[in-house]
Structure formats: C-alpha cells, structure tokens
Amino acid sequence: MASDHFDVLVVGAGISGICAGYHLQTSCPDRTYAILEARDDIGGTWDLFRYPGIRSDSDMYTLGYSFKPWTDPKAIADGPSILAYLRETAREHGIDAKIRFGHRVTRASWSSEEARWTVDVERGERKDAVRFTCNFLFMCSGYYDYAEGYTPEFPGTGRFRGRIVHPQKWPRDLDHAGKRVVVIGSGATAVTLVPAMAKTAAHVTMLQRSPTYIVSMPGEDRVANWLRRHLSPRIAYGITRWKNVLFSLWFYRFCRRNPQRARALITRWLTAELGPDFDVATHFNPRYNPWEQRVCLVPDGDLFQAMRDGRASVVTDQIETFTEQGLRLRSGAELEADVIVTATGLKLLLLGGLAVTVDGAPVNFAKTFNYKGMMFSDVPNLALAIGYTNASWTLKAELICRYVCRLLNHMRDTGTRQCTPRLRDPNLQEAPFLDLTSGYVQRAMDAFPKQGPEVPWRLHQNYALDLMMLQRGSVDDGVMEFANPAERAARPEELSGARAVG
Ligand SMILES: Cc1cc2nc3c(=O)[nH]c(=O)nc-3n(C[C@H](O)[C@H](O)[C@H](O)COP(=O)(O)OP(=O)(O)OC[C@H]3O[C@@H](n4cnc5c(N)ncnc54)[C@H](O)[C@@H]3O)c2cc1C
C-alpha cells in the first residue's frame, strides 16, 4: 500500500490538535506535519456536543490559547462561540489546510529499525484503508469515546413511553418546550442542561443518586473586561489568564488541604444562593470532600435561579425502574416525565482507541508509566496531549505542544531520530493515572497508564509545576533516551533492564 510520509502526524483536530498545528509550524517550521481527524469538522468536543446550553465550565481566558486572546466579554462561553474561536484560530494560521477530515486512525506500528511509525487509517464512510508514515506521532485525540457516552443499565427503559436521550447524541428534532423533563445526574453536563431546558420546559427535575459540589461564578469577568478597555487585548488577556490560573491553583489547594473549611465555605455560598429554606444538607452536601471529584461551575447561579423560580427542582434518590410514565424511585416516589436525559457521563478512552505496537509487540498501556504527563515508558516518539482535571484543559495541552516541539528540535540538533522515556526501575511504586474518585474515572483507570511517586513519572495537576518542568526543564533529563536505530541495534544489552511494555 502506498503511503504519505510526514515528520509529525497529529491525530485529532480539537483544541489540542489545532494547538499542536500552531506550535509545530511556529517552532518547527522545517518539519512537515498533517492532522488526521476522524470527523468531518474541527472542534472535537465543541463540535460533537449539541445539547441545549452547551458551554464551558472553566473560564475562556485559560481555556483559550496563549497565542490567541479571548476577547468576548463572556468568560464562561457557549459551545458555538468556542467553536467559532477554534475555527478562526485554524483559519488565521492556515492550520485548517493541514487537516485531513474523515481519517480515523486505527493502528500505529513503530519500527526501531526505521525509526518511524506506520499509521493505518480508515477513510470516509466506506472505511477505505489508507496508510501514512511519520517520525513522531502526536495524539490529540481527547480522553473519551466518541462513539457513545456512558449509560448505566436501568431496568424498565423499554416500557417508558417518552423519549430517552444521552447528551452526547442529542437528537436535532427534540423539542422539549412545554414538556416534563427529568435529567439523571448532577455533573457538569446536568447542571448546564437543567437551567437551559428549564427556560421552555414545563418543569425540569435534576435527579441525582448523590450530591455534587456546585459553585457559582460570574459569567463575565469584570476585571478582564476593565483590563481590555484600558490595555491592548494581548496584555489584558495575559494578565487575566495568570489571575485565573493563580486563583484556580489556590482554590484547588485550599480545598485539598482544608476539606472541612472548604465544605463549610461552599455550603455558605449555596445557602446564600438558594435561600435559608432550601434543604442544602440533603441535595448539595456530597459524601466526598471538595475536589476529590470535580467541582461544578454554574455561571451567574443560573441553576439556582431556575430552582428558586420553581422551573427546576432537585431530587436525591435512586432509580428503581423506568415506568410507562417516567421513573419509580427507591423511596417509592414517582417522577412523571415526557423526556428523560441520561446525563450519566462519558466513557473514558485512551489514545482514541488506537492499537499500538512497538517492533511487533502490542503495547498494553495499562502496564506503562506516564512520563511528564504526556508520553509513556518504553514507547518511542509518541506523545498524548491530555489536559488538567482541576483547571482548563488547554493550559496543559499547550505546555505539551511546546514540549513536543522542544523534543523535536533537540533530536534535529543532535541528529537523533528516536526518543524513548526509559523506565529503569522495574519496581517503581505505582498509583492510578488520575486520583479523582468519580465513577467515570474509576471505571476506566485499569486501562490507563500508571503514575509513579516522583517526576518524571508523577502526573502533576498543577500548572506552575508543569510550567517549570515542561517549559524550563531539560529535555535530555537522563530518563529520555535519544538514539538512532543503527546505534540501538548495535547495543541491545542497554535495554535489558527496561520493563516490558507488552
Ligand atoms: C461537554 C464537555 C464540556 C467540557 N468543558 C470543558 C471546560 O469548560 N473546560 C475544560 O478545560 N475542559 C472541558 N472539557 C474537556 C474537553 O474535552 C477539553 O476542554 C477539550 O475540548 C479537549 O480537546 P482535545 O482537542 O484534546 O480533545 P477533543 O475535543 O476530544 O478532540 C479530539 C479529536 O480527536 C479526534 N479523534 C479521536 N480519536 C481519533 C482517531 N482514532 N482518529 C482520528 N481522529 C480521532 C476526535 O474526532 C476529536 O475531533 C469538556 C468536555 C466535555 C465533554
């Protein structure tokens, strides 16, 4: 099969893939690259999710790119505005011309002898087999399964006479105006959907098995908007970005170090939002401590406003079964509904489901350790752009894009073609990749790489530490092995201490 060759292949044209394109063409202009995207448009998450009210739940000054100021007065932006920002970025920098749509990458095989990846792709609806080769594979494939979201097995779904929808596959023809809606779940998606649907629905009930921490934040950042009126957009953006980075670092640390004080503070905020008669203790007092799972953000308290107005309500109970009319709960209560939304989460998926082999041996990523939160032990020339769980995704994704460029430039300057993070301690103490206790994380962690107790195997969820490590730290750190295939073939004994990846 004939194949196109690129120095770098990027997989995915969402926030991270566009970011990769920008940094590759800016910092490695002498390298060729292409972006392979399974879908027919750019945007990833922001193109896929089309449910009512879809919006960011972190501020756009940190979810936006460092090189493209976010100038909209809204700090918490709706999905279409984010998509427009991504399209504009791709167009302005000619990144859109590098994207090959309808290219689903299924397999990548590394050959040490050739120091290159062979990448197998299914193209278009007919799934035509296409092959590419590249020296470096940069996965910007996100973190969840695009095919479907997660829905638990609920008894009796077949009996329900209304419609059941999952937010990941929102039907275009669904008109919820005047209908009774139940949203199952109370995560980021549910707290977005409830106030949005409550604008026209007869009533929206948020049904949760257990409560989530929810805090309100102004939809517009007054400091940011003031700065933009008085300074150039770029300077204003830079200051706001740092302000928000530091605030979110502080809030996360405060919550993890002072769980009781953080819980009391959030409860006080909620009582102020919902009024003294609201049963905050039952519906908004989670079993876990703040930031053991994600804390959800709502702009301008829109969820609480909908509840105060009586357009929406919250029920904390468990589903016994779906019925013809709605749901029967463990408590015996019945919830009647015309539409039931299963906002029950995502299925996490590593590397977009890619099957990877290194010199013919399949890689089991669950047996690898993450290196600097972006590469995998004993897997050469492959990086993954994965963002933070406690701050905006883009902050980390962009650090990774820059680091990949530094790696590529180091290899060019030293005349090496292969870079492999080598795990030399076969007894490295292992911990899960993510330490959140949320169900969607726990369900997937067995298939994810591990992290070790110290850098570079430890995953920071901290922008300041990552900035030091990825932007300032040396790429030739004694753990990353830079080599050429011929050299490696001559000295195979050097690798014998490494942990097998298969
Ligand atoms: C509803 C929702 C809201 C969110 N809100 C926020 C937020 O406010 N703040 C925040 O920081 N994060 C948020 N996130 C996390 C969010 O996914 C990231 O912000 C960001 O969009 C991820 O960008 P990405 O480009 O890395 O991945 P994605 O947006 O997931 O894009 C990945 C792209 O890769 C493509 N792809 C995957 N596998 C393959 C393959 N095998 N071959 C070819 N192409 C492939 C996909 O088609 C997709 O286009 C949210 C996530 C969801 C689901």
Image (spheres, grey):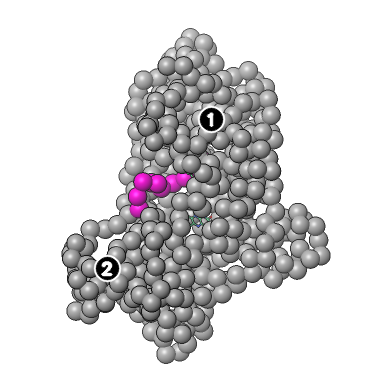
Q: Is residue 386 left or right of residue 224?
A: left
Q: CA distance from mark 1 to mark 2?
A: 45 Å
Farthest residue in the front direction?
173
| Near-viewer residue (39 or 451) | 39
In the rendered image, residue 344, in percent from the top left (x then y), is placed at: 34, 61
Snapshot quadrant of residue 334: bottom left
- In what element is the residue under mark 2? loop
Q: Is residue 434 left or right of residue 74?
A: left
In the picture of the structure, the residue carrying the numbered disc 2 is 162
In the picture of the structure, the residue carrying the numbered disc 1 is 9
Question: Who's the residue at 53% across and 73% down the image?
Answer: 216
Q: Is residue 411 left or right of residue 450?
A: right
Which of the two labelled residues, at mark 1 and mark 2, occupies the earlier sequence position?
1
| Label 1 beta carbon within 8 A of ligand 1 | no
Q: Is residue 221 above or below residue 30?
A: below
Please tell me whether mark 1 or mark 2 is closer to you in this view. 2
Q: Which residues are magenta?
A: 140-149
Question: Who's the residue at 38% across and 31% down the image?
Answer: 127
The three-letter code of the residue at mark 2 reads Gly
Q: How many marks?
A: 2
- In what element is the residue under mark 1? strand
The three-letter code of the residue at mark 1 reads Leu
Farthest residue in the bottom direction?
277
User: Secondary structure of the magenta portion, mostly?
Assistant: loop
